Image (spheres, grey):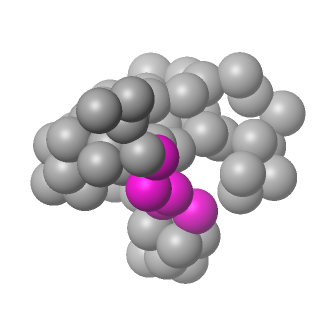
Amino acid sequence: MTKEFACRDIGLDCNFKASAKTQEGLMPKIAQHAKEAHRLDPIPPETLQKVTAAIKDKKGWF
């Protein structure tokens, strides 16, 4: 199963989407995007809660 996140899922007008095999693998991608695109470094705790709540499991094709 793959973990997925999209900025739109937390109400941002942003097309960013990312996926990784684990949440631990996904979080650095989200943090880098938040820093570069949204100037959030670090991500504020209340936003981080929204981010972690919005991470979804996506089933693979196999």
Residue displayed at 46% across by 46% down: 58
Residue bounds of the magenta highlight:
54-58
Q: Position of residue 29 (x, y in %)?
A: 30, 32
Give x and y (percent) for residue 61.
39, 29
Q: Is residue 57 magenta?
A: yes
Residue 49 visible in the shown view: yes
Name the residue located 84 percent from the left edge and 33 percent from the top edge. Answer: 13
Give the overall secondary structure of the magenta segment.
Answer: strand
Identified at 29% across, 32% down, the residue is 62
Report if residue 40 is visible in the image.
no
* Quarter location, residue 60: top left
Q: Position of residue 53 (x, y in %)?
A: 53, 73
In the displayed structure, would residue 59 be above or below residue 43? above
What residue sits 81% from the left and 52% below the top? 11
57 relative to 26 in the view: left or right: right
Task: State the count of labels.
Answer: 0
In the displayed structure image, the side of residue 32 where residue 50 appears, left or right: right
